[in-house]
Image (cartoon, grey):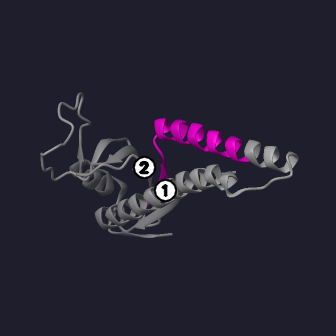
Amino acid sequence: MKFFPQENIYIISSLKPDEIQSRLEKRISAPPSIKISLWSNTISEADFEGYVLNGIFKLKPIITYRNSFIPVIEGSISPYLDGSRIHVKMGLIDAIKVFMSVWLSFAGIGFISMLISQILSSSLSAVVLIPLGMFSFGYGLTNFSFKMESKSNIDTLLRVCEGSLE
């Protein structure tokens, strides 16, 4: 069962696997070893940081704004008919999965314990909705932010690979 948002897509392209790899390499910069400033002022031609090696890639989008829910993009390039088939998997950064698991667990446990407490005391109040709201907000924010970024990155990959979704 998938709890956190993810994408699992296939892109079909008429380009050969070597050409796809070459095009991806041109859109990738090496990940920075240390970020000195809180706000990056550098403009880059690259869309991603990461690597492409022997038909396997792992990418992270380069963005000029703050969004903790950007996807980690992993995939493979394989020959397919007269072109290529690119398998792309996108998911949340592991640290964000851990943080959101803790957040949602506390909110869920808070809701259940407050609900049980109020049911046993025979007095229901709207206060029980606060942890439910916290859970809903956290889960909704995670899904919405990830989907916005994943859609943008799928469009970029389709453009780079001159492909279409399978």
Residue under the point 41% across and 63% down: 148
Q: Is residue 64 left or right of residue 126?
A: left
Residue that mark 2 sits on: 69
Q: Residue at x 17, y 34 (%)?
A: 37
**Residue with the mark numbered 1:** 141
| Residue at the spot 35% in from the left edge and 60% down from the top edge | 16
Instruction: Left or right? Give the position of 135 relative to 33.
Output: right
Amino acid type of the residue that numbered disc 2 sits on in the rendered structure: Phe
Residue 35 visible in image:
yes
Earlier sequence position, callout 2 versus callout 1: 2
Q: Is residue 84 visible?
A: no
| x, y percent for residue 45 | 16, 53
Q: Nearer the viewer, residue 80 or 134?
A: 134
Quadrant for residue 52, please give it: top left
Residues 3 and 111: in front is 111
Q: Amino acid at mark 1?
A: Leu
Q: Is residue 101 magenta?
A: yes
Chief SS of the magenta region: helix
Q: Which dot, 2 or 1, sits closer to the camera?
A: 1
Do the residues bearing badges 2 and 1 touch, measured as CB atoms within 8 Å?
A: yes
- Crowding at mark 1 (Cα within 10 Å: few <14, some 14-19, many 20+): few
Q: Residue at x 35, y 46 (%)?
A: 60
The CA span between labels 2 and 1 is 9 Å
Question: Which residues, given as a range, are shown in magenta?
Answer: 85-111
